[in-house]
Amino acid sequence: MAEPLLEIEGLSAGYGDVRVLWDISLSVEAGEIACIVGSNGAGKTTLLRTISGLVRATSGRIRMAGEDIAPLAADQILSRGIAHVPEGRRLFRGLSVRDNLMLGAYLRRDEAEIVRDLDYVYALFPILRERERQDATTLSGGEQQMCAVGRGIMSRPKLLLIDELSLGLAPRLVERLSEALLEINQTGITILLVEQDVMTAFEIARHGFVIETGRVGMHGATKDLAEDPAIRQAYLGM
Ligand SMILES: Nc1ncnc2c1ncn2[C@@H]1O[C@H](COP(=O)(O)OP(=O)(O)OP(=O)(O)O)[C@@H](O)[C@H]1O
Ligand SMILES: [Mg+2]
């Protein structure tokens, strides 16, 4: 088995006295695309926010390339190579597409490489170059998602966390963004995708984890999960 890039062990977290995640353990191999699926309110977003340091773990470990990052602050976690594309895209109003993309690189000082990565993002999503001076929040939903993914890439991450790639997007756009994820993965970036569209998630990802009320339920190769009768009934409507 390949080395895990991200390894989570016995993780619990929540908000104030409300515990949301219970003893979560999972690992993501270097170079793969993995996915997390589960019903609304299961804790998927909370899990991604805990990995990226926006929610504090109350117990357990989160190892990135062997280092326990659970005690680190969000910007330190970003500097360890974890970028987070949040649910709802969260682009900054009043800032252009280009400035929103450049925000992803705010911790970097390698100017020439930043320019190269911006070119890469524009090659991946040419519409963003055309719209580079436009206020990012006036983009269409699909373009905003491209911008949010692009902003994640601008930090030059080892691991890209994506919360709900397909939400609210037409099938054609979901397909375009899925292809982009595969291309991004080909450059060596590991991806952990949270997705309510289970079919799409299973097509893109190699391994999947089902989160049920804050706990990891079934997990394994997505090709096996897609054949599982319980999953087919609960998540694929079959
Ligand atoms: N900031 C918050 N303060 C208090 N409770 C919260 C907060 N954010 C989320 N929760 C609660 O934590 C639980 C898990 O929410 P979370 O957003 O992680 O679920 P999810 O799996 O991402 O759901 P969805 O599929 O709807 O995006 C829910 O019960 C939710 O109400
Ligand atoms: Mg969510």
Image (tube, helix red, strand yellow):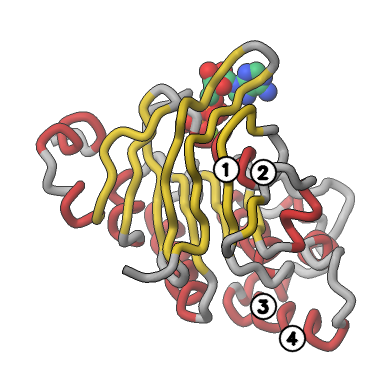
Give the foreground label among 4 and 2.
2
Q: Amino acid at mark 2?
A: Ala
Q: Residue at x 69, y 33 (%)?
A: 55
Q: Earlier in the sequence, mark 3 or mark 1?
A: 1
Spatial CA span between label 4 and label 2: 31 Å
Spatial CA span between label 1 and label 4: 35 Å
Where in the image, quadrant-wise, is ligand 1 located?
Answer: top right
Labels 2 and 1 touching (C-beta < 8 A) = yes
Q: Which mark is residue 61?
A: 1
Q: Earlier in the sequence, mark 4 or mark 3?
A: 4
Q: Is mark 2 within 8 Å of ligand 1?
A: no
- Where is 18 relative to 169, above or below? above
Q: Which residue is mark 3?
A: 122
Q: Is residue 32 left or right of residue 137?
A: left
Q: Which residue is mark 4?
A: 116
Spatial CA span between label 4 and label 3: 10 Å
Q: Amino acid at mark 1?
A: Arg
Q: Give the image location of residue 91, x and y in percent.
A: 75, 49
- Could you classify mark 4 by the number of other residues whose Cα lies within 10 Å: few (under 14), some (14-19), or many (20 or more)? few
Give the foreground label among 4 and 3.
4
Spatial CA span between label 2 and label 3: 33 Å
